[in-house]
Image: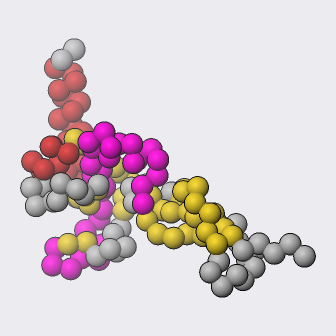
Amino acid sequence: MDDNYTTVEKKQCLVCLRLYDTGVELIDSQHKPTEATHTLTGLGLCPEHQQRVNDGYVALVAIDTGKSELQGGTVVAGGEYRLGKIMWVKREMAQLIAPQVPTSQTLVFCHPNLIDALDKLVKETENESK
């Protein structure tokens, strides 16, 4: 009889919501055999998005504020209604857009119009430089 007491840890990316392996092997503390091969332990950043954060970027993630769960103007953890739009901006730019956001924050939920306006500015700037 070959009992398996271990699983591989998975986390969910805060930005893209994909599950990713952390490479950590988890051992059941009660030594109960398990059929599972992976265990979801929480949230983190997938390697791709961790690299972006390490490079000094912050993710702007568009949400529908009408469908998201808000408390005092702040999105309740897990209560965001994401729209699929994500834009990466340098941390310094994020501080100009939303000075109340801590500098250590890796993502900011925002209205989709903000991403649309920033995207338009970027495209206009690129066209002017050609």
Residue 80 shows in the view? yes
Q: Tell me which corner region of the image, top left, top right, bottom left or bottom right, holds residue 84.
A: bottom left
Q: Give the residue at x 22% y 56%.
A: 104
Whether residue 111 sits left or right of residue 30 in the image: it is left
Classify the position of the N terminus by image quarter.
bottom right
70 is within the stretch colored magenta: yes
Whether residue 107 sits left or right of residue 18 in the image: it is left
Q: Tell me which corner region of the image, top left, top right, bottom left or bottom right, holds residue 55.
A: top left
Q: Give the residue at x 27% y 48%.
A: 58
Q: Give the residue at x 50% y 63%.
A: 11
Q: Tell me which corner region of the image, top left, top right, bottom left or bottom right, holds residue 90.
A: top left
Q: Give the residue at x 30% y 50%.
A: 59
Whether residue 96 sits left or right of residue 50 in the image: it is left
Identify whether 105 is placed above or below 41.
above
Q: Position of residue 85 (x, y in %)?
A: 35, 51
Residue 21 shows in the view? no
- Region of the chain picked out in magenta, as a range: 44-73
